[in-house]
Image (spheres, helix red, strand yellow):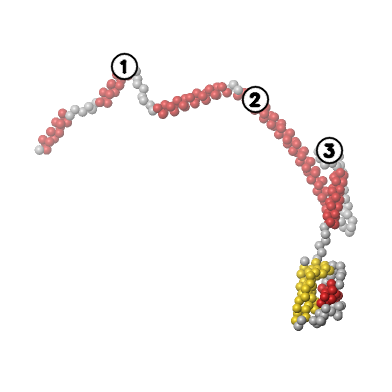
Amino acid sequence: MTFTLRMTSAECLAQERIWFDKPRYDEAERQFYERMNGPTQPKQDTGANSILQDIARARENIQKSLAGSGGGSAADYGELTDRMKNLELENQSLHKVVEELRSALSKVESRVSALEKRSTTPTVNGTSPAAPQKAPPAPAKQEEEDEDDIDLFGSDEEVDEEAERLKEQRLQEYAAKKAKKPALIAKSSILLDVKPWDDETDMAKLEECVRSVQVDGLLWGASKLVPVGYGIKKLQINCVVEDDKVGTDFLEEEITKFEDYVQSVDVAAFNKI
């Protein structure tokens, strides 16, 4: 049974018609048409073709620009060289000016420091310190010429006179300002309790006696009668005094001199103004 099946499969394969040589025939057909019409171009992607065309155009433009600028390169180089030379000359002149300014600045600083030391040196025993000796002039003629060229603030004598004048002016302004400023006067507000002998004491006369005490630096203020007890009232009076001229002891002594009306004087309140 097995042998019969194998034979049947072999017979089937023998009878099957399969074109195993199709690639060979296709190649032969392609060569035939090439000989007839020329070689066929392989199809390429459209996007790739556009990119290649752009690259080709860019290369062509670069070559054209290089070819066009070749003639003017020498002129541009010469112009750049001239500009560099001009910049170098300007740089040298600037360096020279900077050095001159530094020299002038150092000299001015030395003069200013000498003036500050001279003006700020304190006096000893009422005598001013000896003026510093001036340095002798430089013997070199070239140095004198350079110093005259860059003398921005005049000679030492002119600087000294200007400094003294400014000093005197500032002292006068300070003295005038200090004279115009009013002196601060210390004042106090005092509340006094003045007690009579009894309820029959004339309180109007008592107040009149108290207010009769008049001195420089004393100003009497408001007053009122305050009940104490048993029909007796005390005089409570306010006054403003200058501390340097009038004190509480002075007020008590002066008021208690009116023995017919005043029994005692007490300080009820004392406030600085």
Point out the tag, 2 or 3, that comes first from the N-terminus: 2
Crowd rating for badge 1 (residues with CA inside 10 Å; few <14, some 14–19, many 20+): few
The answer to whether residue 9 of the structure is visible from this angle is yes
Point out the tag, 3 or 1, that comes first from the N-terminus: 1
The reply to whether callout 2 and callout 3 are in contact (CB within 8 Å) is: no
Instruction: Give me the residue at 24% from left, 26% from top.
Output: 21
Please, what is the three-letter code of the amino acid marked with disc 2? Gly
Furthest residue toward top:
36
- Decide: is 223 above or below 65: below
Mark seen at residue 36:
1
For marks 2 and 1, give the CA distance: 64 Å
Q: Which residue is mark 3?
A: 148
Instruction: Give me the residue at 86% from left, 44% from top.
Output: 158
Crowd rating for badge 2 (residues with CA inside 10 Å; few <14, some 14–19, many 20+): few
Quick one: quadrant of the N terminus? top left
Q: Position of residue 224 (x, y in %)?
A: 78, 73
Please, what is the three-letter code of the amino acid marked with disc 3? Asp
For marks 2 and 3, give the CA distance: 43 Å
Instruction: Give me the residue at 13% from left, 33% from top.
Output: 8
Quick one: quadrant of the C terminus? bottom right
Mark seen at residue 110:
none
The residue lying toward the viewer, choosing from 248 and 43, is 248
Point out the tag, 2 or 1, that comes first from the N-terminus: 1
Left or right side of 45 for 197: right
Left or right side of 7 for 28: right
Q: Quadrant of residue 174?
A: bottom right
Q: Position of residue 206 (x, y in %)?
A: 83, 76
Q: Secondary structure at mark 2?
A: helix
For marks 3 and 1, give the CA distance: 105 Å
Q: Which residue is mark 2?
A: 78
The reply to whether callout 3 and callout 1 are in contact (CB within 8 Å) is: no
Crowd rating for badge 3 (residues with CA inside 10 Å; few <14, some 14–19, many 20+): few
